[in-house]
Image (spheres, helix red, strand yellow):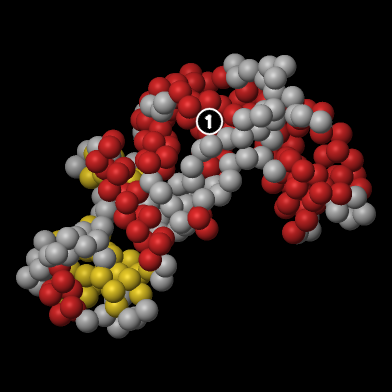
């Protein structure tokens, strides 16, 4: 897209603007800036509010929207909306200590809880058991061995589902993010993608911790996560970890693609990893965690 540099001068009050890499990066009198282009205003406003709250509530730096002279977080340009951000070129933060990993995830949970998003992104966190069973039946003629394996796990699946309390974890813009350091401080660079369902971003991150950390560091990250959220969110996070999302993901993957042996192998690894996580964290699968018949 061809952008009018003079328009940037007018709207944001920069004394000088020139392209470094059109149409994404400019040089101004106050440093390098990155441009983002948005088609959906609802998604843009969600990100604007999320990033502002993330900084104001938790003190964590992120790629917030620079305001125009009249205080707006974006300008309209043709069919697009444009936001401008500081361009961060510092090194990536790959050496976070465990407690910081947990605090970061807790901050994202808390911010997501307080940020309203469009109904199109307000994914349900409730495990769709009946829907998943229906999907499972379609696999019988295609992958009979895989079907049998997945069916035989149903008793364990039921034990991992709550009776009457659907999870209420919020979606969050966690996909495609980058962690950087700016003068020693952590900088969370969110992507411009729509928010992800909670089970994807929270559960996937906890599995990532488990794979990459020693047990002591893993439990420290987990404790920091739970200590950073309220009691209600603690319960929902624990519930999401226990629920058999990997079982559902495997069924949907088999519906949509071939390579069934590869999908089943991946599922079995994730299933065993979840069991190990539950054991390591001593999460309770009590008698009340039985699916209502």
The answer to whether one can see residue 73 in this image is yes
For the point 53% across and 21% down, the residue is 215
Q: Say whether residue 48 is left or right of residue 106.
A: left
Instruction: Name the quadrant of the C terminus.
Output: top right
Q: Is 144 left or right of 25, judged from the image as shown?
A: right
Residue at 14% from the left image edge and 64% from the top image edge: 70
Q: Which quadrant of the structure image shows residue 93?
A: top left
Instruction: Name the residue at 53% across, 30% down.
Output: 237
| Residue at the extreme left of the image, as rendered | 15
Task: Find disc 1 in the rendering and name its residue.
Answer: 237
Give 264 or 137, whichever is nearer the viewer.
Answer: 137
**Above or below for 261 versus 44:** above
In the drawing, does residue 248 fall left or right of residue 183? right
Q: Quadrant of the N terminus?
A: bottom left
Q: Is residue 202 visible?
A: no
Name the side, left or right, on which 197 lies relative to 267: left
Quarter of the rendering containing residue 22: bottom left
Q: Report x, y in % for residue 266.
A: 71, 43
Q: Depth check: 120 or 77 in front?
A: 120
What element does badge 1 sit on? Answer: helix
- Residue 286 percent coordinates (x, y): 68, 17
């Amino acid at each position: 897209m061809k952008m009018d540099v003079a328009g940037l001068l007018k709207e944001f009050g920069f004394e000088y603007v020139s392209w470094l890499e059109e149409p994404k990066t400019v040089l101004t009198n106050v440093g390098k800036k990155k441009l983002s282009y948005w088609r959906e205003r609802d998604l843009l406003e969600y990100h604007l509010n999320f990033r502002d709250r993330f900084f104001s509530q938790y003190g964590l730096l992120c790629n917030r929207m620079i305001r125009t002279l009249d205080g707006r977080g974006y300008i309209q340009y043709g069919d697009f909306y444009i936001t401008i951000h500081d361009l961060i070129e510092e090194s990536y933060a790959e050496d976070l200590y465990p407690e910081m990993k947990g605090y970061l995830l807790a901050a994202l949970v808390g911010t997501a809880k307080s940020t309203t998003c469009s109904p199109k992104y307000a994914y349900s966190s409730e495990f769709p058991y009946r829907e998943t069973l229906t999907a499972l039946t379609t696999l019988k003629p295609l992958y009979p061995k895989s079907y049998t394996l997945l069916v035989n796990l149903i008793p364990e699946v039921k034990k991992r589902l709550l009776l009457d309390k659907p999870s209420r974890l919020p979606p969050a813009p966690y996909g495609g993010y980058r962690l950087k350091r700016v003068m020693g401080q952590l900088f969370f660079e969110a992507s411009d993608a729509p928010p992800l369902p909670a089970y994807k971003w929270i559960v996937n991150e906890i599995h990532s911790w488990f794979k990459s950390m020693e047990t002591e560091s893993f439990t420290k990250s987990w404790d920091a996560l739970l200590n950073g959220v309220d009691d209600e969110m603690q319960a929902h996070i624990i519930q999401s970890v226990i629920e058999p999302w990997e079982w559902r993901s495997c069924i949907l993957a088999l519906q949509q693609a071939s390579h069934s042996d590869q999908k089943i192998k991946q599922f079995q690894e994730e299933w065993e990893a979840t069991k190990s996580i539950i054991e390591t964290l001593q999460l309770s699968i009590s008698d009340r965690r039985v699916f209502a018949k």
